[in-house]
Amino acid sequence: MGHTPASRQKNSIQSQSDDVWEEEKYDNVSNSEQGELVAGIDDGLYDNENKNDTCPDCKEVADHQDRSLQCEIYTYWFHIKCQKVSEKMYEALNEEDGSDQFSWNCKYCKRGAKALMGHITTIDAKQIKTEKRLTMVERKVKCLEDSIGEMKITDELKDFIDSKIEEGISAYRERELRKTNIIIHNLPEADIASPEDRKQEDEQNIMIMARKIKVPDVDIKSIIRLGEKKQKPRLMKVELSTVSQKRAMLQNAKLLTECEEDSMKKMYTNADLSMISRQQNKVLGQRLTDRVARGEKDLVIRRCKIIQLSSRTAEDHEEKTANKMVQPFQENKHNEQV
């Protein structure tokens, strides 16, 4: 059975037989060739049945004398020389018992079909993965529903939950109220009778301290001495305008140890912590002391946790704090006075 335009019989061959017919010959299709074919289809060059006789590759009519094959998908007829179809394949497609069992596709359709099958395979794999995840989620939700159904919320449990929520809200409010505050230790306290004059003197001393530690533009909103007046200077609580000023004062306070005045060298600062934060720091401080006593090294408290610094980080940390005056127990007195 002949496969020519005159016979108008579909030629076919299964994709599984492509390897036998050396399919690699059809893979080296340039983008320009594909573009010309697509452009021809879009421009309507092959809209009717008669124009299907024109080979899209060479734009010549595939007549009775030419060896040609019809693409199963496009239904266009191609010269076998244009599609680089071997004589062996062509003869096989012309066998009488093969025309109804096989289909033949041009090189353009084969390339597109391969890409489409790749996308379909990827989509199938993602769908299977998604269905597995959905099944796991449904199982977890079912277990959670069963657990909630068996749980009985007593009045004591409800009161406990409410108290914890209230504690969290109170802690947040405390942090907000204190977020721009610092505590200054050993700031000289003037022996002046007038409260206004003492306050003015304290503000001047704070401004001098700020300039010494290279924070010259500090803006003080309020100041107050904490506790009863004794021989030793009381703690000074300072409210600044911004959080950035507070951070600068705390970070640069180590420069006080480099000052020439003895009164400045004795001064140091810390954040104005809430009661809960002070209690947490107290517990962490005791744990840190115990671990150091057991021989552990390079331990510091950061973000309410005790961490061990790496060797390089520990050296940097030691260098930064070499000149800083460490008075770990002074803050406890501040906590009592607050």
Image: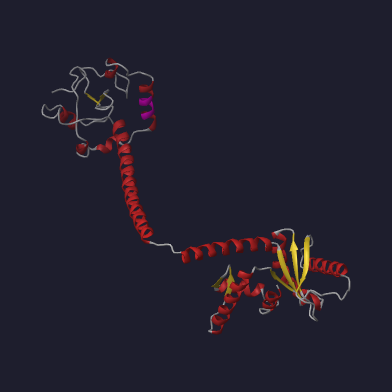
Relative to residue 205, is residue 111 drawn left or right? left
Which quadrant, please, contains the N terminus? top left
Q: Tell me where residue 52 appears, x and y as whole percent.
A: 28, 19
Can I make out residue 42 in this image? Answer: yes
Q: Which quadrant is home to the C terminus?
A: bottom right
Residue 218 in sight: no
Res 9 quadrant in image:
top left
Q: Is residue 219 magenta?
A: no
Task: Read off the magenta span.
Answer: 34-38
Residue nearer the viewer, 219 or 272 = 272
Give how far across and how far down residue 228 sits, in percent: 77, 77
User: What's the residue at 55%, 82% (across, down)?
Assistant: 290
The correct choice, above or below, for 159 with respect to 93 in the image is: below
Q: What residue is drawn where x is 23% and y is 17%? A: 63
Q: Position of residue 243 (x, y in %)?
A: 69, 60
Q: Along the horizontal axis of the image, is 92 left or right of 146? A: left
Farthest-out residue, front: 155
Q: Nearer the viewer, residue 265 or 164?
A: 164
Residue 110 shown left or right of residue 164 in the figure: left
Most common SS among magenta residues: helix
Residue 246 position within the rendered picture, expressed as x and y whole percent measured from the top left? 71, 63
Q: Hey, which quadrant is residue 39 in on the image?
A: top left
Task: From the viewer's side, name the closer residue of 7 and 328.
Answer: 328
Q: Quadrant of residue 212?
A: bottom right
| Residue 120 in the image: above or below residue 284 | above
